[in-house]
Amino acid sequence: MTYAKDALIFDKSVQGRRGVRYPKRNFNWEFTAPEGLAPESAPFIPEVSHLDVVRHYTRLSLRTFGVDTGFYPLGSCTMKYNPRLCDKAAGFDGFAGVHPSQPLITADGIVELLAETSEWMCETTGMESFALQPAAGAQGEFAGMLTFRKYFDHIGESEREIMIVPDSAHGTNPASAAVAGFNVVEVKSTDEGLTDPSAIEAVINKYGAEKIAGIMLTNPNTLGLYESHICEIADMLHKIGALLYYDGANLNALLGIVRPGDMGFDLLHLNTHKTFSTPHGGGGPGAGPIGVKEKLAPFLPGAVFCVKNGKPEVVWPEHSIGRMKAWWGNFLVLVRTYAYFVHIGARGLRRVAENAVINANYIQEGIKDAFEIPYYARCMHEFVASAEHFKREYGVTAKDVDKKLLEKGIHAPTTYFPLIVHEALMIEPTDTESKETLDHFIEVMKGLAEAIKSDPEKFKKPDANLLQVVNPDETAAARNFIPRWYPEDGRQG
Amino acid sequence: MPYISNTDEQRKSMLAAIGIESFEELLDSIPAETRIDSLNLPDGLSEMETLAEMGKLAAKNTTFRAGRIFAGGGIYNHYIPPVVSQLASRSEFVTAYTPYQSEVSQGLLQTIFEYQTYICELTGLEVSNASSYGGASACADAVSIARTATKRKKSVISSNIHPHYRETFDTYNLGWEMDVLDLPYRADAGFVLDAVEIEKMLAGDDVACVVVQIPNFYGCFEGGLSALAEICHSHGTLLAIGVYPFCAGWVKRPGDLGADIAFGEGQSLGIPMGFGGPGLGFLATKKKLVRFLPGRLIGKTTDENGRNAYVMTLQAREQHIRRGKANSSICTNSALMALTATIYLSSIGKEGFKEVGALSSGGAHYLAESLCKLDHVSLAFPDAQFFNEFVIKIENDDPDRIFDGMIEKGVLPGIPLSMFGGSKDRWLVAVTEQNTEEDLEFYVNALKSEVAK
């Protein structure tokens, strides 16, 4: 019997084949299901050998593009090199082998590590207290929004229900605010691509100052531009008693240069898998710690680890919103973050930001004659090019450009985001890429622009030999959703 | 500086290409008064020094021999075959992100499709998401699904689910403001659901969902579960059941019991305890609820040449499309942990999966029976059946001293329920295949001598 090259592990099952062998023990015990719970069917788990498993998943890994495979300029995702020493540290038995219920006196090193991590985060961001429990950026945002809510309830201003979000914001921002019970009001960006103080003023006037809870901003914003009016915006909102939320997705640009806390933000989340180089893991796990100014500290979620009088300490905030997760948070992700801090140090953090910014500007200058850049200016860690002119003249879209990059062994930029740029190609090279890689990318992008002009029809045709699949039928995938493998006997579940 | 590739020479030429002389010129848009000169933090250490520093911190924590850990509460000390950790460390998987570009991500997408299949098999439900943050958020999401699908503002939650799950739900609920009622149990019979009272509670047809856990937080199988779905469904209420994955095959799965939603913590599927995180939240539903299911979904389709292809699908549910109208903001989830669980299940296979369950459950019953023979030690819920976790009661003036004594002897003997607001003379004790006969004997003798002190 043979099976198809792209067979699933379930297709490879052969009755009687064994994987891991477990010990034989005689406990003289036969499990009898409680009344009404006796099973009529068992889950299907395939019977495969170790070698089957190793070949299967090794092959699948080779069909997966990671930072380790090639250049990955996925905007707003900060796909930089993930240091192996951080992974190694996270694997130490003194971290990985500790049960979360262990009395904290048996986990001194963990408490110290988490307290120090909070200290590093406070100093890096200009905040005064950190909660490390949220599991990822979006959960941090959600926790942050609930923190705002609890704070307003506490001071008797529960009627503040409007959360202002710029139209360039990550989708998680309005979603987090809405799930936390706020009404989201979007504001338009200026022609320069910045948040418009007068648009915020208009919202305040329209809904009434006492109704405004705050604003969620990313700075640099998703166009890669620094919000130079930020202090003015902060004053305007603080004056009416509202709060400022900082989305840390783009913090890589600012490390050691300027701190959200100093810009007037009251609360922020960090994405450790972006800024502090913990692996993205194909979509997590991340960690989304949130940091606050003192007045919001009593409302933070979960346990707060901090250093008091030189000693690590665990504090449960007095008016905490509660927990976001079972136990303490994504600890092994935070171990990697701390190792990264210790290894690169204060000056290293600054060098990260400098190189992230230089690399982005270098690419922008390199491709600006080939691709339109609608909000062209000196950028921070990323910028947004557009394929709109190619679409208009040649019918070639940003998606077509993506596919050509993939054929050439480069991961596509973030495409069709931010929404305010048509046919957007959001490019973030990160700090760890070399000039040689950037030069290659620039050459490729210029070549693509030429190729579009010389033969747009050919350009639109992906090369089946260079891609794993070509134009997968996404409409069919949604319309006739096949969510899992089914056995050939037609049994469903 | 580690990890920065560009030399000073290259930096200079790059600045020149940008048309500037110094880096500072790139910061013109940042008002000078908000900038800082430096961070008040130490300078970096070399690789060797960093690892030594991390090693020192790791060494400050007490670790127990694999067989001497008897703590569970959602995080279990199951054996992790090296093949699992090694394959899950393949750097292409580790350093990829969400598979936005299916043309170069078929491997990752296929692993998630396999994961979704496994979760459907373990829960008996039809659709699984690509993973959630953890068991607690998956539980909150389960209620959220019911809330948005039924448009009802009440939920009934068992007080015997994991207390952290309940607390997490309460946090999420700050934004939802649902009324929450306790699931009624029969006063005369421990963990037996009170069908009459439940019926009354649901009679108004205004309850979005009922949430229970199998086994419950105390390790017990509750009575009356098989009738629960019918009561719920007759009032348009959805049933959400939390599960411990290894119970599949030994007792009915949530889907077999008529549940609409299943959730749980998947850490036990090959993921280290890691002080509780990262773990893996799993969340599965009936197909009809898929529109309300948060998180990524992978679907199977074909490409233009007829090849099988896997893609992210039904994205219209998600935050990046729905923005302010989304039901959840989840974006990054626990993909690498889902991959780990997938490789784990494939590695242990059908027989291994059964053996882990049999060894864990067998060891737990052996231990429970042996402990009951000791003076001043008894089962807290002697009438309830359990799988691999149970609560013991210790009659002593100072149970904490006994707990500490066990730790002194190198045994993590369980979790005192005082950690969850319960009493300190009750410990939640979990057994896995890593606890050998000798370890179980050691536990019994250690406790015997501590109690006798």
Image (cartoon, coloured by chain):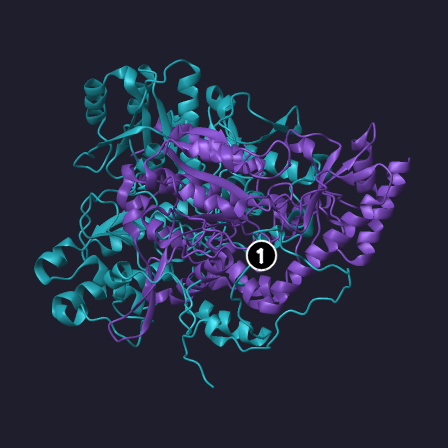
Chain colours: A cyan, B purple
Q: Secondary structure at mark 1?
A: loop
> Which of the pair A312/B34 is nearer the observer?
A312
Q: Residue furthest front?
A: B196
Viewed as shown, does residue A336 lie left or right of A296? right
Q: Quadrant of residue A151?
A: top left
The residue that disc 1 covers is A38
Place of residue B151 in the rendered image (x, y in percent of width and height, measured from the top left): 32, 36
Q: Residue furthest bottom?
A: A1
Residue at image point 27% right, 49% down: B316
Residue at image point 61% right, 55% down: A88
Q: Quadrant of residue A401?
A: bottom left
Q: Quadrant of the C terminus of chain B?
A: top right
Q: Does residue B44 lie above or below A150 as drawn?
A: below
Q: Does residue B442 lie above or below A322 as drawn?
A: below
Look at label 1 and name its amino acid.
Ala
Q: Residue furthest left?
A: A393
Place of residue A21 in the rendered image (x, y in percent of width and height, measured from the top left): 67, 70
